[in-house]
Image (spheres, rainbow, N blue to C red):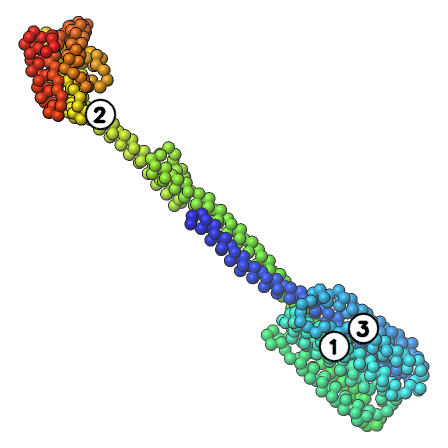
Amino acid sequence: MKLSRQLTLSTAALGLMVCGMLGHITRDAWRRYDDTGAGLQALRLTQSAMVAAEKLSAERGPVNAVLGEQSGGDPARRERLRQARAATDLALLQLERELRADVGRQLQGYDAPHPVAIEPLYAALGAARGEVDRLAAQTPATRPPAQLQGAIARMFALVPLALDAVTNYTLLSEQAYPRISRTLIKARYAVELREYAGRLGSILTVPLITGQPLTLAEHEQMNVLRGRLQLLRQQIQMPFRVDGNPPALTAAIARMDRVYFDGGQQLVTEIEQASRAGHAYATEPGQFAQRYVPTMAPIVAVRDELLRAAQAQAERDRDHALRELWIAALSGVAILLALTLLLLIVRRRVIVPLLRATRAVIRLGNGDYSRDPGGAQRADEIGDMLRALSTLRTNSIERQQLELERKRLIEELRKRADTDYLTGILNRRAFAKAGNRRLHHARERNELLAVLLFDIDHFKSVNDNHGHEAGDQVLIQVSELVRNELRDGEILARHGGEEFVVMPSNCTREQAGLLAERLRSAIAREPLTISGGQVLRVTASFGVASASGPQAALDDLLHQADLALYRAKRNGRNRVE
Ligand SMILES: Nc1nc2c(ncn2[C@@H]2O[C@H](COP(=O)(O)OP(=O)(O)OP(=O)(O)O)[C@@H](O)[C@H]2O)c(=O)[nH]1
């Protein structure tokens, strides 16, 4: 597989792995963020349900005051009852609104009990208030104690309905966001504490109205409630395992201990003691409610402090989760960008130069040195490689030039070895090679072969009379003259000194004689101009020999021609024999 493809595939695989990992991290961060959001939502619902439960509890105070009045309708008490009812209605409306807006959106998907429907609570509340109003319309003396008890019991029965909602929303909050569960459980205890504190006070309502002592059952009921209140108080006081209670919560608990457990319960104890002693009660229900109810406010403050702590924790966690989500998403994008950039850099800085280098190596291998691989300005390893290739190209060009020069020199040497240095025609050695080749050829085809040997007459006198250099010029001009007379395929060579040899192809003795005659007359006819402008005329004597058949040998042929030449010299020169 090619390197560029391998790189693309491995980068893609790496990118996928990084994407998968980041997807996982981002999904986790998103889930945490979503959980804290859902937790906050559930927390708001829990808070609304707790406020509704508290308002329902609080409504019992004015109810007791109105039902416990001694004479006629007290407008101030009625007004307090109206205000308490308005506060309850507002809290329920708030809860209902949040339920409609939020449940099914944020909290969907959590396997929690379905929050209680608000309608049964409204029905029970309507019925209880109707009963209270009916009794309040009667004069105090005509209000039967049993019916008063019934009306108060109905009011009591409302709170568990709201507490059910509290419990369910608390569970939802816990499930959506477990980190705040301990705080919410404590808040739930505070709500219960407020409810039981209210109940403790409410037990006294009827005895205070009727002026009767508390019954044994009422004493026992009060002891049970006190026990529960102590238990809940201890649970709330118990510090959180990791961080302990926050200072604001510690202060709220201390205030609750002082105001309610010391002050509020003291009021209850005083009435209990008067009942046991058989004394008349020093207070009537309205006055008692006015003194007792405010002592329960710090309990609600503790609850609110706990809810505030839970909310602060959830918001902190949500901000943290959001920050992590951003970090995961941004680092994912940054890693992917870095990978892409790396791929592009490697492709541009490594793969492309490698491909260029490969092409350059192939070109060099094929002997094409036309283009330089380039990249000399790069300071990295690829630059080193390209520079090495450039050097290789330069060396190869030099080597190629040397090789050409060597070939040219060899060719020149070969030529020189075969060429007569003076006349430029073949020398005796080259003639022997060419002549033997032709002889061999003639033998194969059974052709006739002839040799003409000629020698310039009285050449010595040319040298003697005109100088050796003039003799050289005569030799050169005679060879040129003869070469011009010959046709292609007719070999001319200097056989030595002033002696030349001609070998025509496939030629009879007669044809060779005619050729010799033609050459002889051309030499004799041609005036030769030597340096200094002097004109000379020379003649030459020719000896002709021919041979055919397998026995023919070049030396024999030359020997016979030489004999014929000798005869021509002897017979007067400038002739053909
Ligand atoms: N200038 C010159 N002279 C040469 C060369 N080679 C041989 N000679 C001369 O050629 C002459 C040959 O002389 P000879 O063999 O006596 O023959 P000739 O004078 O031609 O007389 P015949 O052949 O009998 O007609 C000698 O003087 C050689 O020195 C050469 O390359 N240049």
C-alpha gap between disc 3 and disc 2:
122 Å
Which residue is drawn at the image coordinates 83% and 71% (left, top)? 89
Query: Which numbered dot is residue 575?
Result: none
Give x and y (percent) for residue 10. Answer: 47, 53
Give x and y (percent) for residue 296. Answer: 77, 79
Mark 3 sits near ligand 1, with its Cβ under 8 Å away: no
Give x and y (percent) for residue 483. Answer: 20, 14
Q: Amino acid at mark 2?
A: Glu
Which residue is drawn at the image coordinates 76% and 91% (left, top)? 220
Q: Is 151 placed left or right of 417 in the picture?
A: right
- Crowding around mark 1 (Cα neighbors within 10 Å: few <14, some 14 to 19, many 20+) is some
Q: Nearer the viewer, mark 3 or mark 2?
A: 2
Work out whether residue 280 or residue 171 is closer to the camera in this orientation and state it. Answer: 171
Give x and y (percent) for residue 417. Answer: 17, 25
Q: Amino acid at mark 3?
A: Glu
Which residue is drawn at the image coordinates 94% and 83% (left, top)? 139
**As drawn, 527 above or below 429:** above
Mark 2 sits near ligand 1, with its Cβ under 8 Å away: no
Query: Which numbered dot is residue 412?
Result: 2
**As drawn, 203 above or below 93:** below
Query: Decide: marks 3, 2 in contact (CB < 8 A)?
Result: no
Instruction: Decide which of tag 1 and tag 3 comes sooner along the chain.
Output: 3
Which residue is drawn at the image coordinates 67% and 71% (left, top)? 111
Q: Which residue is mark 1?
A: 164
Q: Which residue is mark 3?
A: 119
- Crowding around mark 3 (Cα neighbors within 10 Å: few <14, some 14 to 19, many 20+) is few
Camera sees residue 99:
yes
